Image (cartoon, rainbow, N blue to C red):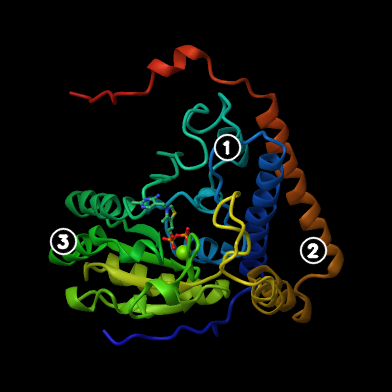
Amino acid sequence: MAARKSTAKSNVSADDLLKHYKDMLLIRRFEEKAGQLYGMGLIGGFCHLYIGQEAVVVGLEAAAEEGDKRITSYRDHGHMLACGMDPNGVMAELTGRMDGYSKGKGGSMHMFSKEKHFYGGHGIVAAQVPLGAGLAFADKYQENGRVTFTYFGDGAANQGQVYETFNMAAIWDLPCIFVIENNQYAMGTSQNRSTSTPDLHTRGEAFGIPGEIVDGMDVMAVKEAGERAVKHCRSGKGPYILEIKTYRYRGHSMSDPAKYRTREEVQKMRDERDPIEQVRDVLLTGKHASEEDLKAIDKEIKKVVNASAEFAKDSPLPDVSELWTDIYAKVEA
Ligand SMILES: Cc1ncc(C[n+]2csc(CCOP(=O)(O)OP(=O)(O)O)c2C)c(N)n1
Ligand SMILES: [Mg+2]
């Protein structure tokens, strides 16, 4: 159960790198656009952007297989795009439109996709953690070989229900990967101020759950750690913890004055550790892509993102009658 520090050293193919680059860039550009639309008053309520954390979901999705499940918190747009959900449907939901994933009734924090096995989108801190174990329980019961990625933050890692879940997941050897996205801040509180011991990957030791710490700004390190975790869970050995050290560049939500950290701290992270820039450098220095190739990719992605904003703006608001639909599930006899 010894903690291990991950480093990316694999012989990764240029095609893989290019795919990770595109996937991360799509999330970044999508989130930038969501920030703009929020500023224009087109997105209401809360909106938690994922900018800076892109390598976490892109790396883990590269380790997942068809049928694996994912569930996360309110900072969920990146997770949805990374598992292949449609940017149009996500943007339409953010703007409260009928063509959104929850017909415009859920917004940023409440989207789901049965097709892509994405189970939300949860606004209550850590509430998704026991739900994730429940999904993994269903897979174990059905003996279908699937694993569930249960994402939560460093702040959520201090919630009591996480430890009740760890206990049950360990007792039942559930195929659940607990992904702690440690971006160092819980809303306005730094991990140093709120957490008695900094090593969140060791939080499963009392329950016999192995864990490791991962460089979350390095997409390949995340992918490799994800593969180890998936292998462990799929082979029936029970749950696994990945503490992925990452960083969010924007405020906690759109209404955060961010007085708990300096601009210099954020700028330093952007300049020295940015996950997209790191892959860009490898692509260019390894001559796997030219500046022109990368410019063309950026242009293509901006087109997709702009189209999603147009799609959202053109989609109608939900009819008042929608207030009475989608309240109860139909249970098949
Ligand atoms: C049970 C509960 N308590 C408090 C809140 C308010 N709240 C929303 S996000 C948040 C911080 C969580 O931080 P972290 O788990 O590190 O996730 P991050 O926002 O960094 O992704 C808090 C306290 C909430 N939504 N639910
Ligand atoms: Mg956090």
Note whether residue 308 is visible.
yes
Residue where numbered disc 3 is placed: 168
Query: Would you place residue 36 above or below residue 298 in this image?
Result: above
Q: Position of residue 278 (x, y in %)?
A: 68, 75
**Looking at the image, which residue is at 86% across and 64% down?**
292
Q: Nearer the viewer, residue 201 or 257?
A: 257
Q: Which mark is residue 283?
A: none
Q: Secondary structure at mark 1?
A: helix
* Three-letter amino acid code of the residue under disc 3: Met
Comparing labels 1 and 2, the label whose residue is closer to the camera: 1
Q: Is residue 119 left or right of residue 32?
A: left
Q: Which numbered disc flags the more N-terminal residue, 1 or 2?
A: 1
Residue where numbered disc 1 is placed: 94
Q: Nearer the viewer, residue 307 or 107?
A: 107
Q: Are marks 3 and 1 in contact (CB under 8 Å)?
A: no
Q: Which numbered disc flags the more N-terminal residue, 3 or 1?
A: 1
Q: Secondary structure at mark 3?
A: helix
Q: How far is the residue under mark 2 from the one under mark 3?
A: 47 Å
Q: How far is the residue under mark 1 from the one under mark 2?
A: 28 Å
**Looking at the image, which residue is at 38% across and 86% down?**
4
Query: Would you place residue 71 above or below residue 221 in this image?
Result: above
Q: Which numbered disc flags the more N-terminal residue, 2 or 3?
A: 3
Taking the view exactly as shown, the residue that stands out farthest to the top is: 321
* Three-letter amino acid code of the residue under disc 2: Leu
Query: Would you place residue 177 above or below residue 125 in this image?
Result: below
**Looking at the image, which residue is at 71% across and 72% down?**
277
Residue where numbered disc 2 is placed: 294
Q: Position of residue 151 (x, y in %)?
A: 40, 59
Position of the C terminus by quadrant: top left
* Three-letter amino acid code of the residue under disc 1: Leu
